Amino acid sequence: MIARQSFASRLIAESDAQSEALIGGVRMFVAGVLFVTVVALLMRLPLNGFLLRQTELQAAVVVTLLYFLLGLTSFLLVRWGHYKPIYGLAFALLEVALVLANIFFDVRDFETSSLFALASPLILMVTLVLVLQVLRYRLVVHVVASILLLSGILVLLMFDMRVGQPATPRVLAELQQMYSLPPNLVRVLMLCVLATIVGLAIWRSRRMMETIAQELEAAHNRNRFLPRELTSRLDDAELAKLREGQEREVVVMFVDLRGYTALSQTISTSETAALLTRYRQLVSGCITENGGIVDKFIGDGVMCFFGLECSPQRAAEQGADSALAVHRLINEWNEQRKLASEPILSIAVALAAGPVLVAALGDDTRLEFTVIGPAVNKASRIEGFAKEIGQRTVLDARVFDLLGELSDAQAAALKLDSLGQHRLRGENVTGALYALR
């Protein structure tokens, strides 16, 4: 079975292919400019006394044509969809080989110092090869190509028979030709090409930065809908595991605002929105600070759970702490509401523990992270029971047992009262329930 490539890997591979197509276009353009210039130099050089230099220029024409074909091949491979990452390294090595071959033809004259090869405008091809690597974002290719290219140039330039000897009239004449109008135009054009490549690299880097910034912004917004424990590592592989689901024992908590329906009928729509916004901020803040995950908001109700990344005992403690913290904050909010002559609010909290399926449910276009299982249904029924009997916080026997496993110091702050055996709505058996004071 072939492993599916992640989105990040596909994005990088697509960027590499686009880079190679762009580099191929630059190669063809540069080869065209060099071809015209070298042909012009061949036409300007007199036949007598410059036979060797003409041979070198003819070799430069061949190298330029091969360089054009290299650019055309890389461009077409990308356009036809046959490009592979290994081709980028192969093309870079072929490029290095062509540049070194061109320099070799410049230094093979034993009557001329190899240092004069640096006078040729074609030496700017070395800079071009190095600068082209900034379009790839592949450090290995850049390092390998740079080491081979610079090492080859060093070897060729050191293979010199006339270093320190006076220049002959022929060499001086050749130098004069090397700095005539056509070669100087090539130098200017090559510098323009180099500046353009740097501009393209900056443009591509800017686009990548904008893409990353947008993704970070999207990730920040996703944190409003998904817990940070998930969004911090939600790549394609983790998402695939999450869609399969995992079974965990968690503590599910429901929080419900009592009398909300009647209250909403006595206040305006904007006041209702402000009330729910503030209420949800208080509740979700308590849950998050105590290690819980908000699953969803259901009108004036909040469903959350604890224990995704901790033991059931720790999850029970986090749930109990959250329940106490929510009540405390609601009481503080009520003090402010009294001063503003606003109705007093009351909530009911339910806790139930048990195995659930933690999963991302849905299709490829929309997923919903949630937990499903008997513990969720039980917590919802306990929340309704708590409202019926006027209790603030009610928990099932499993949460009570988990809290009993805490140390004496941890359990000292928790005051639990037995509510006896009760059969919840929709269930056929009775079970022990407890109130948290």
Image (spheres, rainbow, N blue to C red):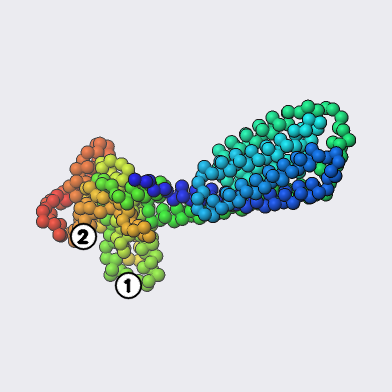
Which residue corresponds to the image point at 50% horizontal and 48% vertical from the top-left? 13
**Which mark's residue is nearer the viewer, 2 or 1?**
2
Q: Would residue 148 be found to the left or right of residue 364 on screen?
A: right
Apparent side of residue 49 relative to residue 384 in the rendered image (left or right) = right
Q: Secondary structure at mark 1?
A: loop
- Residue at the (36%, 58%) spot, across then down: 364
Three-letter amino acid code at the position of disc 1: Thr
Give the structural element (helix, strand or loop) at label 2: helix
Res 221 visible:
yes
Would residue 61 be found to the left or right of residue 406 on screen? Answer: right
Q: In this rendered view, identify the residue nearer to me: 84 or 403.
A: 84
Toward the viewer: 115 or 402?
115
Query: Given the image, on which type of amino acid does mark 2 rest?
Result: Gly
Residue 118 location (% of width, % of height): 76, 37
Q: Circle 2: is it few (<14), some (14-19), or many (20+) Cα within 10 Å?
A: some
- Indicate the quadrant containing the N terminus: top left, top right, bottom left or bottom right: top left
What residue sits 15% from the left and 60% below the top?
A: 425
Picture coordinates of residue 174 (x, y %)? Answer: 84, 40
In this rendering, the answer to whether 350 lies above or below 168 is below
Mark-to-mark CA distance, 2 and 1? 23 Å
Above or below, comparing residue 405 to residue 320 in the picture: above
Q: Position of residue 418 (x, y in %)?
A: 16, 49
Give the residue number, with chain letter if any, for mark 2. Answer: 384
Residue under pointer 1? 266
| Classed neighbour count for the residue bearing mark 1: other residues with Cα under 10 Å, few (<14), some (14–19), many (≥20) | few
Which corner quadrant of the image does residue 276 belong to?
bottom left
Query: So how many labels did they put on this image?
Result: 2
